[in-house]
Amino acid sequence: MTTEPFQLTELPVLSRSAVTRDELIRKDEGALDALWQAGLVVLVDDLGRTPVTEDATALLPRRARELSATRPTEARLLGQDGDTAYWSVPADEPMREGAVAPPNAWGLWTGAVSEAGEHWHDLRAVGALLDDASAGLFTTAAGLANWHARARFCANCGSPVRAVAAGWATHCTGCGREEYPRTDPAVICLVHDGRGVNGESVLLARQPVWPEGRFSVLAGFVETGESLEACVEREVAEEVGVRVADVRYLGSQPWPFPRSIMIGFTATADPTAPLVPADGEIEQARWFSRETVRATLAAGGALDGLFLPGTTSIASRMLTGWAAAG
């Protein structure tokens, strides 16, 4: 049995990236125009989907110059890899809905097929299948797309805004105010029973809107004026009615649905304390043994009516790290 506290065994899949971000170049119009000419473009439709290879291990970007001879106003610079700049642009292409995701994708979402025969999929469905560069590009592209879709008007005066800084800011056409992409912090916590170093059982819960049998670790948004650790304590108490101790940081992952970052923690709680699921928010909460979690993970995340989080989520990495300890 290990004597070390468990950690994440792998980097969360949406935290991977292989391009360089350069904030200074985003306001250099001449450099941006040159980067467009030699760039590749990640298309993102209004449902957050992009074309991917048949096995969904890589994106299928377009050559920028084939889309437009000059840089469009809606082009967003994702980063650079050597001499290649990657951009994202909103897409509106005719689609045939209902394309089945590739094997090992997170199967809660279906994709679409374009008239050219390309398969378009959501980041949640295929994020874990993508290579590092593709995962990082798609995560950033989805996050920027979601922000722009929700930030079309100035929060100060209500006037329309226009994108500036290669899509990384907006400028109000009324009062001149600049706004930058928002990220809403949320904590996500694996609570175990505290027996030994890493416990023997884990507390999982399910929301009413989830498919029957799907359970995950507990999560919630950080409130104004609240520390991350205090948020862990409050959210667990609110959602399942138990007090936690020994709060410890594990890692983080962007979650651009629409604009969050999931900040992972672990904590301990008394497994004999009564569980009181929050009405309307938590349908069921249960303690599961390490053996049950290990067997379910080994079976691909679903076994005997228990469905664990898909591998795109940091929750999957947290459970995998905990199950491997002990």
Image (cartoon, grey):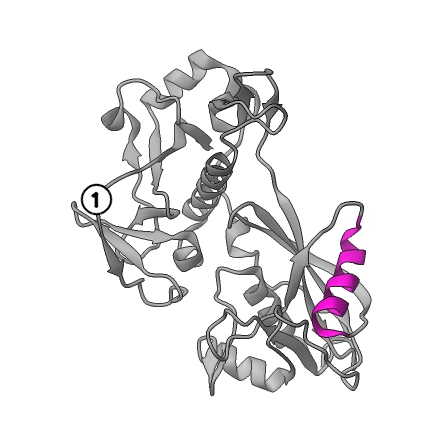
Farthest top residue in view: 30
Question: Is 40 part of what is drawn in magenta?
Answer: no
Name the side, left or right, on which 166 lies relative to 96: right
Q: Which amino acid does label 1 sit on?
A: Pro
Q: Is residue 111 above or below residue 196?
A: above
Residue 320 in the image: x percent, y percent?
A: 58, 71
Which quarter of the rendered picture does the C terminus lie within?
bottom right
Can the viewer see residue 129 in this picture? no
Query: Residue 279: image x %, image y %?
Result: 65, 72
Q: Is residue 229 magenta?
A: yes
For the view shown, which residue lies furthest in the front direction?
Answer: 158
Q: Residue at x 47, y 75 (%)?
A: 301
Q: What element carries label 1?
A: loop
- Locate the N terminus by quadrant: bottom right
**What is the span of residues highlighted in magenta in the rendered image?**
226-241
List x then y, in percent, for residue 84. 38, 29
Q: Name the residue located 37 percent from the left edge and 61 percent from the top edge.
A: 109
Question: How many C-alpha atoms fall within 10 Å of the one at disc 1: few (<14), some, or many (≥20)?
Answer: few
Determine the image quadrant of residue 314: bottom right
State whether residue 243 is above or below residue 113: below
User: As drawn, is 317 to the left or to the right of 62?
Assistant: right
Tell which of 291 and 123 is nearer to you.
Answer: 123
Overall secondary structure of the magenta section: helix
The answer to whether residue 198 is seen in the rendering is yes
Residue 122 against residue 246 in the figure, above or below: above
Which residue is labeled 1 in the image?
A: 94
Taking the spot 38% from the left edge, 16% from the top edge, the residue there is 33
